[in-house]
Image (spheres, rainbow, N blue to C red):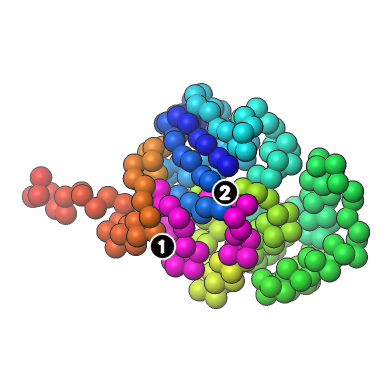
Amino acid sequence: MLSIKDLTVRIEDKLILQGINLEVAAGEVHAIMGPNGSGKSTLAQTLAGHPDYHVCQGQVSYQGKDLLSLNVEQRAGAGVFLAFQYPVEIPGVSNIHFLKSALNSLRKQRGEPELDAFDFLTDVKQKMAQMQMEEALLYRGVNEGFSGGEKKSNEILQLLVLEPQLAILDETDSGLDIDALKRVAAGVNAFRSPERALILVTHYQRLLEYLVPDRVHVLQDGRIIRSGGPELALELEQQGYAPNQPETITDL
Ligand code: ADP
Ligand code: MG
Ligand code: MG
């Protein structure tokens, strides 16, 4: 589904990603872990097509297409979805209007007819119930005044409504209490299918107890320095990202 080769990315004149290679097949869940500032969000934003992130080198192929040649809307239309680390507030645009416009825009790109308003609302409410979200959140501005947990749940609601093929979740678990984390994980597990792939950016192993990945990759200084199975996340949790660092200065 996704093949990243030697991806090198800069922001302004700063080199952030330095030759990323990653293969994600349909049906797989890959976790990207790594210390703060290692480039995890940069990878996510680059795949989603954020204009500030300049690709200097490398290729990204998505379902056989050159992903980097598509603009943000075309990528969304092709089934790529990014849940932001810091979900944006859109005051004045109701959540329900936003969801409906986003889905209709995707359907238009795919040559599908507009949704029936009643069927759409029924579907959204059912998905909100699944996420244990209050229906009142549909009629407020997108994320406007939402709590941290409500914003993260709202990202997962978008995921469930828009039904992308490749979802990239950037620290969707950060700042959640354990019950909210379980709800988010249940929502994401409901999204998993043999046709869909998922890239989870996370700092913590905790989410991965509920959402078991096929592969775990460690990003550091813009490079993938290790890859492994789910056990790698546990090891990182116990030993940190730099297990071979000397404990004290005398070890040097
Ligand atoms: P992570 O998500 O792993 O914490 P990021 O991808 O957010 O890391 O950041 C990687 C590096 O890129 C950091 O050094 C960060 O300061 C830098 N960076 C991110 N966004 C910008 C920006 N808009 N302008 C300049 N530097 C940035
Ligand atoms: Mg960070
Ligand atoms: Mg980040």
- Residue 98 lies, in percent from the top left, at 80, 54
**Residue at image mark 1:** 205
Q: Amino acid at mark 1?
A: Gln
Q: Is residue 148 visible?
A: no
Q: Which residues are magenta?
A: 188-217
**Residue at image mark 2:** 26
- Quadrant of residue 73 in the image? top right
Q: Which sits earlier in the primary sequence, circle 2 or circle 1?
A: 2
Q: Do labels 2 and 1 touch, CB within 8 Å?
A: no
Q: Residues within 10 Å of mark 2 (few under 14, many from 20)?
A: some
Name the residue furthest front: 194
Where disc 1 sits, the SS reads: loop
Residue placed most toward the observer, 179 or 151: 179
Q: Residue at x 69, y 32 (%)?
A: 71
Q: Is residue 197 above or below residue 96?
A: above
Where disc 2 sits, the SS reads: loop
Residue placed most toward the observer, 192 or 6: 192
Q: Amino acid at mark 2?
A: Ala
Q: Is residue 198 above or below residue 178?
A: above
Which marked residue is nearer to the observer: mark 2 or mark 1?
2
Whether ligand 2 has any atom under 8 Å from the Cβ at mark 1 is answered as no
Q: Is residue 87 above or below residue 136?
A: above
Q: Residue at x 78, y 65 (%)?
A: 124
- Residue 96 lies, in percent from the top left, at 82, 60
Q: Is residue 190 above or below residue 64?
A: below
- Quadrant of residue 208 in the image? bottom left
Residue placed most toward the observer, 28 or 83: 28
- Residue 241 lies, in percent from the top left, at 31, 52
Q: Residue at x 84, y 49 (%)?
A: 104
